[in-house]
Amino acid sequence: MPGGNEKRRLGLVLVGLVLVVGTAFGFWYVLQTIDERQGYVVASRDIVRWDRVGSSDFAIIEANVGEAVAMTPNEMGPIYGQWSTGNIPVGTLITPGMFQVPPMSSESESKSVVTALPLPSGEVAFGALATGDRIALIGREPDEADPLADALGDSVAAAPEQPPLTLIGILQLEDVRDNQIFYVGDPLGALELLELLERFERAQDNKIWRIGIDVTAEQLMLALQGETATVGTDIGSE
């Protein structure tokens, strides 16, 4: 009957519409399941070591970082006002370890920073270094400016003299944890300590002496020059 055919056609159209809508919804659901992107924070500028950062130093991107560690916008609150522990190029994903919390609580330390420096490696007597040790860093530093070697050039193979043992520096280890020295002071002082440790690591025959609180740099230099036999019973050497 004509009326029956029209109802059948209307039913088929409705079924088709349901299938189309269902397919579109299923496709959208699959895309949402597969696309695991979310907002992550990146540096919006080149951040330099010891820069104090705020919200304007960061931007938000949509990304899927997989197993990588990265901070989301709602985790950034505690970061604002902290200091950068190193140089962070623009566009770098932000992680908590890139920043530290210096100013200290007391007024006398309000401009100080807490810095973790690598514990110096070298020959040391009487066990590992620990909190409270006062140490002298000894080594042979190469003479980087040798005018004779520059004049002779590479064509002459001259046997260079071994540089003498010298005192590179003295350190008071106030807080040692996990093979690191934790230093409280101003950023410039922290950089100077880091440069001192880098000098020691570059030196040859580097040694570490434990020294007493009353031992001076002048006494250590005299001992290294052989002008005195000892400089105190607290010095430890091989």
Image (cartoon, rainbow, N blue to C red):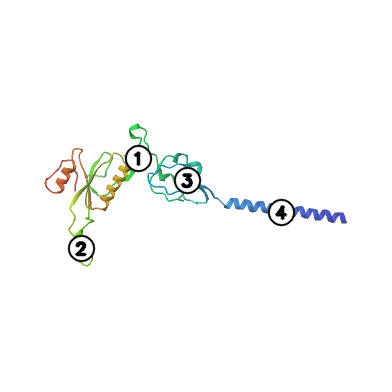
Between 193 and 97, which is closer to the camera in this rendering? 193
Q: Which image quarter is the N terminus in?
A: bottom right
Instruction: Name the kind of residue labelled 3 in the image.
Output: Phe
Residue 205, horizontal then vertical, whole percent: 22, 53
Q: Which amino acid does label 1 sit on?
A: Val
How far apart marks 2 and 4 lie (CA) works out to 88 Å
Q: From the image, tell me which residue sits under label 3.
A: 58
* Residue annotated with mark 4: 19
Determine whether 148 is above or below 54 in the image.
Answer: below
Q: Residues within 10 Å of mark 4 (few under 14, many from 20)?
A: few
Label 1, on which residue? 114
Residue occupying image coordinates x 47% and y 45%: 58
State the image coordinates of residue 30 (x, y, percent, origin top left). 61, 52
Kindly identify the amino acid type of the residue bearing the numbered disc 4.
Leu
- Distance between the alpha carbons at the discs numbered 1 and 3: 23 Å
Q: Distance between the residues labelled 3 and 2?
A: 52 Å
Task: Write the residue at 44% across / 46% down.
Answer: 95
**What residue does disc 2 label?**
151
Could you classify mark 2 by the number of other residues whose Cα lies within 10 Å: few (under 14), some (14-19), or many (20 or more)?
few
